[in-house]
Amino acid sequence: AHQWLIEKFPKSPYAQKSLLELGKIFILDRKIEEATLYLRRITSPEIIERFYWLGLCAWWNDDYANAISYCENYLRLAPRGEFAEKSYYLIAECYLEQKKAYSAVATLLKLQNAKLPEMDEQYFYYRLGYAYELSDKPIDAITAYRKGYEQDPYSQVAYQIEDRILELKSSKPSIDISFLYPYSPLQVTIVQEEQPDTLKTSVTTDSKSSSSSTAKQIEVKQDTPVKLKEKPKEGYWLQAGRFSVESNANRLVINIRLLNIPAAYYEDVSGGKKSWVVVCGSFPDRAKAEEAKELLATNNINSFITAY
Protein backbone atom coordinates (compact mmCIF):
# COMPACT_ATOMS: atom_id res chain seq x y z
CA ALA A 1 0.00 0.00 0.00
CA HIS A 2 2.83 2.40 0.87
CA GLN A 3 4.61 1.76 -2.43
CA TRP A 4 1.41 2.16 -4.45
CA LEU A 5 0.68 5.54 -2.88
CA ILE A 6 4.24 6.73 -3.46
CA GLU A 7 4.20 5.71 -7.12
CA LYS A 8 0.72 7.05 -7.96
CA PHE A 9 0.55 10.21 -5.84
CA PRO A 10 4.13 11.04 -4.74
CA LYS A 11 3.32 14.58 -3.56
CA SER A 12 0.14 13.73 -1.66
CA PRO A 13 0.16 13.93 2.17
CA TYR A 14 -0.47 10.18 2.44
CA ALA A 15 2.43 9.36 0.10
CA GLN A 16 4.70 11.66 2.09
CA LYS A 17 3.71 9.90 5.33
CA SER A 18 4.28 6.56 3.61
CA LEU A 19 7.84 7.61 2.79
CA LEU A 20 8.36 8.36 6.48
CA GLU A 21 6.91 5.04 7.63
CA LEU A 22 8.98 3.06 5.12
CA GLY A 23 12.08 4.92 6.21
CA LYS A 24 11.45 3.99 9.85
CA ILE A 25 10.79 0.36 8.91
CA PHE A 26 14.13 0.17 7.10
CA ILE A 27 15.84 1.70 10.15
CA LEU A 28 14.35 -1.05 12.34
CA ASP A 29 15.69 -3.60 9.85
CA ARG A 30 19.12 -1.90 10.00
CA LYS A 31 18.89 -1.12 6.27
CA ILE A 32 20.22 2.38 6.69
CA GLU A 33 20.95 3.20 3.05
CA GLU A 34 17.40 2.33 1.98
CA ALA A 35 15.97 4.28 4.92
CA THR A 36 18.00 7.35 3.97
CA LEU A 37 16.77 7.22 0.36
CA TYR A 38 13.11 7.17 1.41
CA LEU A 39 13.51 9.88 4.05
CA ARG A 40 15.29 12.21 1.63
CA ARG A 41 12.33 11.97 -0.77
CA ILE A 42 10.06 13.66 1.77
CA THR A 43 9.34 17.24 0.73
CA SER A 44 6.39 18.09 2.97
CA PRO A 45 7.33 20.88 5.43
CA GLU A 46 4.85 19.40 7.91
CA ILE A 47 6.87 16.20 8.42
CA ILE A 48 9.58 17.73 10.59
CA GLU A 49 10.49 14.48 12.34
CA ARG A 50 12.22 13.29 9.18
CA PHE A 51 15.22 15.39 10.21
CA TYR A 52 15.64 13.37 13.41
CA TRP A 53 15.47 10.07 11.52
CA LEU A 54 17.91 11.34 8.88
CA GLY A 55 20.21 12.33 11.75
CA LEU A 56 19.94 8.83 13.17
CA CYS A 57 20.79 7.33 9.76
CA ALA A 58 23.82 9.62 9.46
CA TRP A 59 24.94 8.58 12.95
CA TRP A 60 24.67 4.90 11.96
CA ASN A 61 26.97 5.66 9.01
CA ASP A 62 29.48 7.48 11.27
CA ASP A 63 28.64 10.71 9.45
CA TYR A 64 28.59 12.74 12.64
CA ALA A 65 28.68 16.21 11.06
CA ASN A 66 25.52 15.55 9.04
CA ALA A 67 23.86 13.83 12.01
CA ILE A 68 24.40 16.96 14.10
CA SER A 69 23.15 19.18 11.27
CA TYR A 70 19.94 17.18 10.79
CA CYS A 71 19.16 17.15 14.52
CA GLU A 72 19.85 20.87 14.83
CA ASN A 73 17.40 21.43 11.96
CA TYR A 74 14.80 19.44 13.86
CA LEU A 75 15.37 21.45 17.05
CA ARG A 76 15.17 24.72 15.13
CA LEU A 77 11.80 23.78 13.62
CA ALA A 78 10.35 21.92 16.63
CA PRO A 79 12.26 23.00 19.78
CA ARG A 80 9.74 21.23 22.03
CA GLY A 81 8.72 18.50 19.60
CA GLU A 82 8.30 14.79 20.22
CA PHE A 83 11.89 14.03 19.20
CA ALA A 84 13.56 17.08 20.78
CA GLU A 85 15.03 15.19 23.73
CA LYS A 86 16.31 12.39 21.50
CA SER A 87 17.83 14.96 19.13
CA TYR A 88 19.83 16.53 21.96
CA TYR A 89 21.11 13.10 23.03
CA LEU A 90 22.03 12.19 19.46
CA ILE A 91 23.96 15.45 19.01
CA ALA A 92 25.80 14.84 22.29
CA GLU A 93 26.60 11.26 21.26
CA CYS A 94 28.04 12.50 17.95
CA TYR A 95 30.30 14.93 19.81
CA LEU A 96 31.49 12.14 22.10
CA GLU A 97 32.26 9.96 19.09
CA GLN A 98 34.34 12.85 17.72
CA LYS A 99 36.20 13.17 21.06
CA LYS A 100 34.55 16.56 21.67
CA ALA A 101 33.36 15.95 25.20
CA TYR A 102 33.10 19.64 26.09
CA SER A 103 30.67 20.18 23.21
CA ALA A 104 28.67 17.17 24.42
CA VAL A 105 28.42 18.74 27.89
CA ALA A 106 27.28 22.04 26.37
CA THR A 107 24.61 20.24 24.33
CA LEU A 108 23.26 18.40 27.36
CA LEU A 109 23.15 21.60 29.40
CA LYS A 110 21.07 23.13 26.58
CA LEU A 111 18.71 20.18 26.94
CA GLN A 112 18.45 20.84 30.67
CA ASN A 113 17.71 24.53 30.09
CA ALA A 114 15.07 23.67 27.47
CA LYS A 115 12.90 22.25 30.30
CA LEU A 116 11.12 19.80 28.04
CA PRO A 117 7.98 18.12 29.42
CA GLU A 118 8.35 14.57 30.77
CA MET A 119 12.12 14.51 30.32
CA ASP A 120 13.82 11.36 31.63
CA GLU A 121 15.96 13.07 34.27
CA GLN A 122 17.72 9.93 35.46
CA TYR A 123 18.93 9.11 31.97
CA PHE A 124 19.86 12.78 31.46
CA TYR A 125 22.15 12.81 34.50
CA TYR A 126 23.66 9.49 33.41
CA ARG A 127 24.65 10.93 30.01
CA LEU A 128 25.74 14.27 31.54
CA GLY A 129 27.95 12.45 34.04
CA TYR A 130 29.53 10.42 31.27
CA ALA A 131 30.22 13.57 29.21
CA TYR A 132 31.81 15.22 32.26
CA GLU A 133 33.84 12.05 32.85
CA LEU A 134 35.24 12.17 29.31
CA SER A 135 35.91 15.91 29.80
CA ASP A 136 38.21 14.96 32.68
CA LYS A 137 35.93 16.61 35.23
CA PRO A 138 35.52 13.81 37.78
CA ILE A 139 33.88 15.97 40.47
CA ASP A 140 31.21 17.24 38.08
CA ALA A 141 30.80 13.69 36.77
CA ILE A 142 30.25 12.18 40.21
CA THR A 143 27.79 14.97 41.09
CA ALA A 144 25.71 14.24 37.98
CA TYR A 145 25.93 10.47 38.52
CA ARG A 146 24.76 10.88 42.11
CA LYS A 147 21.75 12.98 41.09
CA GLY A 148 20.79 10.33 38.57
CA TYR A 149 21.41 7.37 40.87
CA GLU A 150 19.39 8.77 43.78
CA GLN A 151 16.29 9.27 41.63
CA ASP A 152 15.72 5.51 41.51
CA PRO A 153 18.55 3.27 42.81
CA TYR A 154 16.87 0.10 41.52
CA SER A 155 16.30 0.98 37.87
CA GLN A 156 18.32 -0.38 34.95
CA VAL A 157 19.82 3.08 34.40
CA ALA A 158 20.91 3.16 38.06
CA TYR A 159 22.89 -0.04 37.53
CA GLN A 160 24.57 1.54 34.51
CA ILE A 161 25.35 4.64 36.57
CA GLU A 162 26.85 2.48 39.30
CA ASP A 163 29.05 0.80 36.71
CA ARG A 164 30.41 4.19 35.64
CA ILE A 165 30.91 5.33 39.25
CA LEU A 166 32.96 2.25 40.08
CA GLU A 167 35.00 2.66 36.90
CA LEU A 168 35.64 6.29 37.83
CA LYS A 169 36.58 5.31 41.38
CA SER A 170 39.17 2.83 40.06
CA SER A 171 40.97 5.62 38.20
CA LYS A 172 40.33 8.37 40.79
CA PRO A 173 40.62 6.66 44.22
CA SER A 174 40.13 9.90 46.14
CA ILE A 175 36.55 10.34 44.92
CA ASP A 176 33.91 9.86 47.61
CA ILE A 177 31.26 7.34 46.56
CA SER A 178 29.89 6.62 50.03
CA PHE A 179 26.40 7.62 48.84
CA LEU A 180 26.22 4.27 47.02
CA TYR A 181 26.32 2.38 50.33
CA PRO A 182 24.94 4.81 52.94
CA TYR A 183 23.97 2.25 55.57
CA SER A 184 26.31 0.74 58.13
CA PRO A 185 25.71 -2.84 59.30
CA LEU A 186 23.21 -3.10 62.15
CA GLN A 187 23.89 -5.79 64.75
CA VAL A 188 20.66 -7.18 66.19
CA THR A 189 20.33 -10.07 68.62
CA ILE A 190 17.07 -11.94 68.15
CA VAL A 191 15.70 -14.00 71.02
CA GLN A 192 13.31 -16.67 69.83
CA GLU A 193 10.56 -17.88 72.14
CA GLU A 194 8.95 -21.27 71.93
CA GLN A 195 5.40 -21.23 70.62
CA PRO A 196 2.69 -23.85 71.02
CA ASP A 197 2.46 -26.21 68.07
CA THR A 198 -1.04 -24.98 67.24
CA LEU A 199 0.14 -21.36 67.07
CA LYS A 200 3.09 -22.30 64.83
CA THR A 201 0.74 -24.09 62.47
CA SER A 202 -1.62 -21.11 62.37
CA VAL A 203 1.17 -18.63 61.68
CA THR A 204 2.63 -20.80 58.93
CA THR A 205 -0.75 -21.22 57.26
CA ASP A 206 -1.55 -17.51 57.44
CA SER A 207 1.86 -16.59 56.10
CA LYS A 208 1.53 -18.91 53.13
CA SER A 209 -1.97 -17.63 52.41
CA SER A 210 -0.85 -14.00 52.54
CA SER A 211 2.16 -14.68 50.34
CA SER A 212 0.12 -16.44 47.70
CA SER A 213 -2.47 -13.67 47.59
CA THR A 214 0.03 -10.81 47.15
CA ALA A 215 2.67 -12.34 44.91
CA LYS A 216 2.10 -13.32 41.32
CA GLN A 217 2.68 -17.03 41.00
CA ILE A 218 5.04 -18.16 38.27
CA GLU A 219 5.48 -21.91 38.08
CA VAL A 220 9.18 -22.14 37.34
CA LYS A 221 12.14 -23.80 39.01
CA GLN A 222 14.08 -21.80 41.60
CA ASP A 223 17.09 -24.14 41.83
CA THR A 224 19.28 -22.26 39.34
CA PRO A 225 22.66 -21.23 40.82
CA VAL A 226 23.34 -17.50 41.14
CA LYS A 227 26.19 -17.69 38.61
CA LEU A 228 25.89 -19.98 35.60
CA LYS A 229 28.94 -21.70 34.18
CA GLU A 230 27.95 -20.72 30.64
CA LYS A 231 25.29 -19.03 28.53
CA PRO A 232 21.94 -20.90 28.51
CA LYS A 233 21.50 -23.27 25.57
CA GLU A 234 17.77 -23.99 25.53
CA GLY A 235 14.40 -22.75 26.71
CA TYR A 236 12.75 -19.35 27.08
CA TRP A 237 14.68 -16.76 29.08
CA LEU A 238 14.51 -13.07 29.93
CA GLN A 239 17.64 -10.94 29.62
CA ALA A 240 17.44 -8.27 32.30
CA GLY A 241 20.80 -6.53 32.10
CA ARG A 242 24.45 -6.56 31.08
CA PHE A 243 27.12 -5.11 33.38
CA SER A 244 30.82 -4.38 33.29
CA VAL A 245 31.03 -4.95 37.07
CA GLU A 246 30.17 -8.46 38.32
CA SER A 247 28.84 -7.26 41.70
CA ASN A 248 26.12 -5.26 39.94
CA ALA A 249 24.93 -8.36 38.11
CA ASN A 250 24.90 -10.29 41.38
CA ARG A 251 22.88 -7.53 43.07
CA LEU A 252 20.26 -7.46 40.34
CA VAL A 253 19.92 -11.26 40.53
CA ILE A 254 19.22 -11.02 44.26
CA ASN A 255 16.59 -8.30 43.73
CA ILE A 256 14.86 -10.32 41.03
CA ARG A 257 14.82 -13.48 43.16
CA LEU A 258 13.04 -11.51 45.87
CA LEU A 259 10.18 -11.21 43.37
CA ASN A 260 9.94 -15.03 43.25
CA ILE A 261 11.44 -15.10 39.75
CA PRO A 262 14.41 -17.42 39.12
CA ALA A 263 17.43 -15.41 38.05
CA ALA A 264 21.14 -15.92 37.49
CA TYR A 265 24.01 -14.35 35.61
CA TYR A 266 26.82 -15.61 33.39
CA GLU A 267 30.12 -14.25 32.20
CA ASP A 268 30.36 -13.20 28.57
CA VAL A 269 33.50 -12.27 26.64
CA SER A 270 33.09 -10.32 23.41
CA GLY A 271 35.75 -8.35 21.57
CA GLY A 272 38.21 -9.08 24.34
CA LYS A 273 35.96 -7.41 26.94
CA LYS A 274 34.24 -9.14 29.85
CA SER A 275 30.67 -8.45 30.89
CA TRP A 276 28.14 -10.20 33.10
CA VAL A 277 24.66 -10.87 31.75
CA VAL A 278 21.60 -11.26 34.02
CA VAL A 279 18.98 -13.74 32.82
CA CYS A 280 15.73 -15.06 34.28
CA GLY A 281 14.37 -18.53 33.65
CA SER A 282 14.17 -20.88 32.10
CA PHE A 283 10.42 -20.78 31.45
CA PRO A 284 8.35 -23.63 29.99
CA ASP A 285 6.80 -21.42 27.31
CA ARG A 286 6.62 -17.84 26.04
CA ALA A 287 3.44 -17.12 28.02
CA LYS A 288 5.21 -17.75 31.34
CA ALA A 289 8.13 -15.62 30.18
CA GLU A 290 5.68 -12.81 29.37
CA GLU A 291 4.20 -13.07 32.88
CA ALA A 292 7.65 -12.72 34.42
CA LYS A 293 8.51 -9.84 32.10
CA GLU A 294 5.37 -7.95 33.19
CA LEU A 295 6.19 -8.52 36.85
CA LEU A 296 9.72 -7.20 36.33
CA ALA A 297 8.36 -4.16 34.50
CA THR A 298 6.08 -3.29 37.43
CA ASN A 299 9.25 -3.19 39.55
CA ASN A 300 11.09 -0.92 37.07
CA ILE A 301 13.29 -3.69 35.68
CA ASN A 302 13.38 -3.78 31.89
CA SER A 303 13.91 -7.09 30.11
CA PHE A 304 13.32 -8.87 26.82
CA ILE A 305 12.47 -12.45 25.91
CA THR A 306 15.04 -14.63 24.18
CA ALA A 307 14.78 -18.28 23.15
CA TYR A 308 17.72 -20.67 22.88
Image: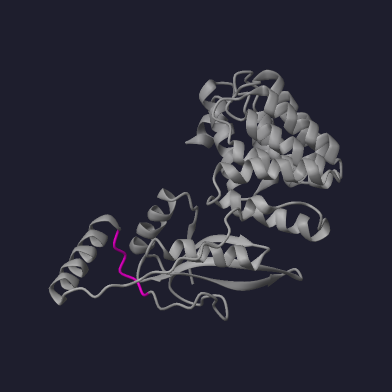
Residue 79 vertical position relative to residue 142 in the rendered view, above or below? above
Residue at x 43% of width, y 51% of height: 299
Seen from the viewer's position, the closer of residues 255 and 193 is: 193
Q: Where is residue 290? Give x, y as percent.
A: 38, 58
Residue at x 61% of width, y 46% of height: 149
The answer to whether residue 161 shows anywhere in this view is no
Q: Count the numbered circles shown.
A: 0
* Quadrant in which residue 206 is drawn: bottom left
Q: Where is residue 261? Give x, y as percent.
A: 40, 65
Q: Is residue 96 left or right of residue 112?
A: right
Assign the magenta stretch its main secondary structure. loop
Q: Where is residue 182? Give x, y as percent.
A: 60, 53
* Quadrant in which residue 185 is drawn: bottom right
Q: Where is residue 218? Give x, y as percent.
A: 31, 65
Residue 204 vertical position relative to residue 133 in the rendered view, above or below? below
Seen from the viewer's position, the closer of residues 158 and 49 is: 158
Residue at x 83% of width, y 34% of height: 103
The answer to whether residue 85 shows anywhere in this view is yes
Range covered by the magenta-colored residues = 216-221
Seen from the viewer's position, the closer of residues 85 and 185 is: 185
